[in-house]
Image (cartoon, grey):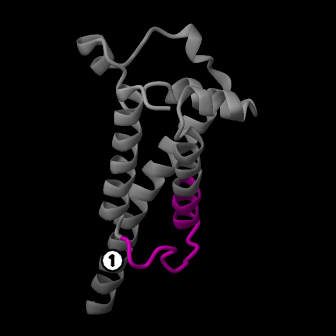
Amino acid sequence: MHLDRLKLLIEKKESSRLSPALFRMVLLGSVLLVSRFINPSMLPPICPFRFLTGIPCMFCGLTHAFHAISLGNFSQAVALHPLSLFAYGLVIFHFATATARVLGLKFGRIFPKLSILNMMWLTFSLFTLVWLVKLSGID
């Protein structure tokens, strides 16, 4: 009896860890597919920050850049947003790790000293720095 309960608890814990990975896999896979097959020029502008302030946000240009990368136009992508290759690489990396987790593949942490939160802060800081440089007009 107790063994059956323990098995149920373990299965529940495993499925609860699988849900976020499955969500990330589907979300990031969708981003990659959409960036390949939908031309952002055909869509209305979607940046609320730019709409409200008239200033491009730190992520403006990434949608067009992702589309350019998906078509193999890397120089155009970098011209649209300097961090586009980095951001696209992050999407692929997180898609791959989420897919591996969904498939049950185990691996050690690639960056053992960096937590997910620290990596997010570093990425956000990098985007902020590039954004401020672009706003200042320094090239």
Residue at position x 51%, y 10% from top? Answer: 43
Up-down: is 69 above or below 121?
Answer: above
**Residue occupying the point 35% across, 55% down:** 120
Q: In which quadrant is the N terminus drawn?
A: bottom left
Residue 37: x percent and y percent? 67, 24
Between 60 and 136, the one lying in front of the other is 136
The residue drawn where x is 59% and y is 29% is: 65
Part of the protein shown in magenta: 95-114
Q: Is residue 96 left or right of residue 15?
A: right
Q: Secondary structure at mark 1?
A: helix
Extreme-front residue of the structure: 138
* Residue closest to the far right: 72
Q: Quarter-wise, where is residue 103 in the image?
A: bottom right
Q: Residue at x 51, y 80 (%)?
A: 108
Across and down, in percent, residue 137 comes to 41, 25
Is 22 above or below relative to 118?
above
Specify the principal SS of the magenta part.
loop
Inspect the image, locate mark 1, and give the three-letter code of the amino acid beneath it. Leu
Per the image, the residue denoted by label 1 is 8
The answer to whether one can see residue 8 in this image is yes
Percent across and percent down for residue 39 are 62, 17
Left or right, 101 with respect to 12, comes to right
6 displayed left or right of 40: left
